[in-house]
Amino acid sequence: MNPHGGPRVNPVNPLEQALHAARALVLADLVAREVADADVVSLVEESVAQRRWWVQQWPEGVEFIAGLVAQDVQDALLERYGRWPLCPVCGSGDPHALDVEPELGPDPHWVCHKAGVKVAAVGELGGAGGGAASS
């Protein structure tokens, strides 16, 4: 019992909090680009499960989870459906996907290497123009 008379509630584990946040950010980007069907959401869940194990082995990497889940989903989409997310910045030339930077670091962003610009933070593609998966 806690001092206020109710049952004691355990605080959320920081690892689980980071995993849930990463899931939410990547899902927000998938929804923003209209590719969040059930198969794609399953890819997110697979990545979160794999990254749970990874961060249990390397707890200092917890702040890198969002970028890693975004990269995992991007790689899985490339294998199954095509490039994602397409760059909304470059209006001409071949369609190309954005990259996550830093590859292993905090505060991940979607970046267009052709134009050399940050397009949006992971989880904020909704405000960065359109672009569905395309091969």
Image (tube, rainbow, N blue to C red):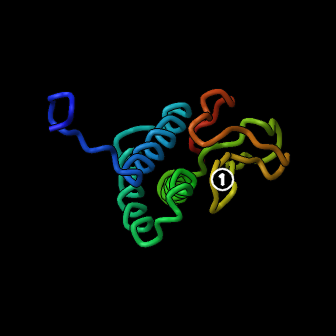
Relative image position of residue 99 (x, y in whole percent): 68, 53
Residue lying furthest front in this view?
Answer: 3
Relative image position of residue 68 (x, y in whole percent): 54, 58
Label 1 residue SS: strand
The residue drawn where x is 67% and y is 49% is 97
Question: In the shown orientation, is residue 30 left or right of residue 118?
Answer: left
Q: Quadrant of residue 78?
A: bottom right
**What residue does disc 1 label?**
100
Q: Indicate whether 25 appears above or below 52.
A: above
State the residue in front, 51 or 82. Answer: 51
The residue drawn where x is 50% and y is 38% is 30
Q: Indicate whether 43 appears above or below 125.
A: below
Relative image position of residue 25 (x, y in whole percent): 51, 40
- Residue 14 is at least partly visible in this image: yes
Question: In the shown orientation, is residue 15 left or right of residue 71?
Answer: left
State the residue in front, 43 or 132. Answer: 43
Question: In the shown orientation, is residue 61 left or right of residue 4?
Answer: right
